[in-house]
């Protein structure tokens, strides 16, 4: 029996507990069987390309392979050639987090994601998340056009039992797709992941434990880099870290900064949450009740751009707190540019930022408008598409249970 209490199970997942009759596990704790993942990882070949999170290295490539690699980069802005040759089930190797760390519904939005990368994300969750804590994985298709992501994907995930696909008929962007997933989710905690991630051992439990402790915390893992050229996973190191947190400038651009001295002093040890003004927004967990309490996402934000800052400001101004949980580690492929196109992309992003400033910055919006000519111009010429009344569906929050 694992010393992982059930006092917070209503927050952790909408699950049915196993019958404990005949076991020696006391009431109020999970059994070892419940803490196993949904899928046991198959045996790994430690010498295989990319095994244990290592880089994919191919010294000699014939012309056909070189052409395939270039086409994959052009389409996805990462090395799809390498991804397609690395196991979908790859293990990330020995647990290298700080030693203090060693003792839901998941929603993944995708649009024309590479098959191997999307499925490796799914398998990474299934191989690492305890079955007792994971209700289902929702893959939300934002109107993909690749044939392999249609019927073939539906048929493939049927074998995975707790994975299902939701589809938007028209491409509407990240926010609308995530809201579709949140509405369909059955669990009491929502975890949002990008479609090109890999989860390190023990990534889910620290996120859920923090939400159980503080229901208004919106928590993000420490995000590790997966190299876009060779898919090497930058594993955490057990020694002391120089952690970073999110920030923003007056152009309303997200960035990173070292945590200040006061925050270092406030943290009691390496496992302690890091308060962050903003977050990257691609990977985070939130209590579904608090997500609804603060009005979810702004559903008038279009496609992509600014939604992470909008959510950051919303959390802090609606009674919550935004935190990075160091013991939770999830890898992410960082691309230099988006491979996906959408109509009037520049003007849509500017419109989203104007909307963000109007809703959350009050008189401080003029700081952004004065520094960014593009935002100022969009504000000055705003039309009915930008004019709006903010009627957030904020509801009373009950944190008594």
Image (cartoon, helix red, strand yellow):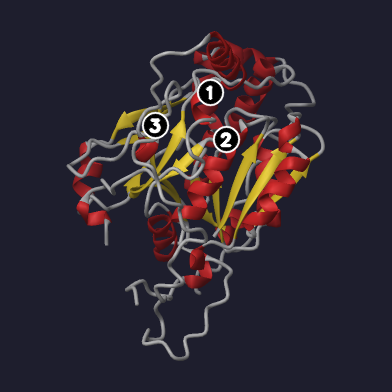
> In x, y percent, where is residue 128?
44, 54
Q: Nearer the viewer, residue 67 or 64?
A: 64
Labels 3 & 2 near each other (Cβ < 8 A): no
* Lower sequence index among marks 3 and 2: 2
- Image quadrant in which you'd find residue 35: bottom left
Tell me residue 393's x, y (percent). Answer: 68, 53
- Compute the Cα span from label 1 to label 3: 18 Å
**Which quadrant, please, contains the N terminus?**
bottom left
Residue 149 vs residue 99: left or right? right
| Residue under numbered circle 1 | 81
The picture quadrant where one finds residue 170 is top right
Q: Give the residue displayed 51% in from the left and 58% down from the top.
A: 39
> Circle 3: is it few (<14), some (14-19), or many (20+) Cα within 10 Å?
some
Q: Which mark is residue 246?
A: none
- Label 1 or label 3, whichever comes before in sequence order: 1
In the rendering, at what x and y percent does residue 361 appear?
53, 33
Instruction: Report x, y in % for residue 263.
Output: 25, 43
Mark 1, secondary structure of its residue: helix
How dense is the environment of label 1, judged by Cα within 10 Å: few (below 14), some, or many (20 and up)?
many
Name the residue carrying label 2. Answer: 116
Secondary-structure class at tag 3? strand
Is 204 drawn above or below residue 251 in the view shown? below
Q: How many marks?
A: 3
Camera-near label (3 vs 2) is: 2
Residue under label 3, please give it: 225
Residue toward you, 356 or 124: 124
The answer to which of 109 and 245 lies nearer the viewer is 109
Q: Quadrant of residue 230?
A: top left
> Separation of disc 1 and disc 2 at Cα?
10 Å
Q: Residue at x 37, y 51 (%)?
A: 201
């Amino acid at each position: 029996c694992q010393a992982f209490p059930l006092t917070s199970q209503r927050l952790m997942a909408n699950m049915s507990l196993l019958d404990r009759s005949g076991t020696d596990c006391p009431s109020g704790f999970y059994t070892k069987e419940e803490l196993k993942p949904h899928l046991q990882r198959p045996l790994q070949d430690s010498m295989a390309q990319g095994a244990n999170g290592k880089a994919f290295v191919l010294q000699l490539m014939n012309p056909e392979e070189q052409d395939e690699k270039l086409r994959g980069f052009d389409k996805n802005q990462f090395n799809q050639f390498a991804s397609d040759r690395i196991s979908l089930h790859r293990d990330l190797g020995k647990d290298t987090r700080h030693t203090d760390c060693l003792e839901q519904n998941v929603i993944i939005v995708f649009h024309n994601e590479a098959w191997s990368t999307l499925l490796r994300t799914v398998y990474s969750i299934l191989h690492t998340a305890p079955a007792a804590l994971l209700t289902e994985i929702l893959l939300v298709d934002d109107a993909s056009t690749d044939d392999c992501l249609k019927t073939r994907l539906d048929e493939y995930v049927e074998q995975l039992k707790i994975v299902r696909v939701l589809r938007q008929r028209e491409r509407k962007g990240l926010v609308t797709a995530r809201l579709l997933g949140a509405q369909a989710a059955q669990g009491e905690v929502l975890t949002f992941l990008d479609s090109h991630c890999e989860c390190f051992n023990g990534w889910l439990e620290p996120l859920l434990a923090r939400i159980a402790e503080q229901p208004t915390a919106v928590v993000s893992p420490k995000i590790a880099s997966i190299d876009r050229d060779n898919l090497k996973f930058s594993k955490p190191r057990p020694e002391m870290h120089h952690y970073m947190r999110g920030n923003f400038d007056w152009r309303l651009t997200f960035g990173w900064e070292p945590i200040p001295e006061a925050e270092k002093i406030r943290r009691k040890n390496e496992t302690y949450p890091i308060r962050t003004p903003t977050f990257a927004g691609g990977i985070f967990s939130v209590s579904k009740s608090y997500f609804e309490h603060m009005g979810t996402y702004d559903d008038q934000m279009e496609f992509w751009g600014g939604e992470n800052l909008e959510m950051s400001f919303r959390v802090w101004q609606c009674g919550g707190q935004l935190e990075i949980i160091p013991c939770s580690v999830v890898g992410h492929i960082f691309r230099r540019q988006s491979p996906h196109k959408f109509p009037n992309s520049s003007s849509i992003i500017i419109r989203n930022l104007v909307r963000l400033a109007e809703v959350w910055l009050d008189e401080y919006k003029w700081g952004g408008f004065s520094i960014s000519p593009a935002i100022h111009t969009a504000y000055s010429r705003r039309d009915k598409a930008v004019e709006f009344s903010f009627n957030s569906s904020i509801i009373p929050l009950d944190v008594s249970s």
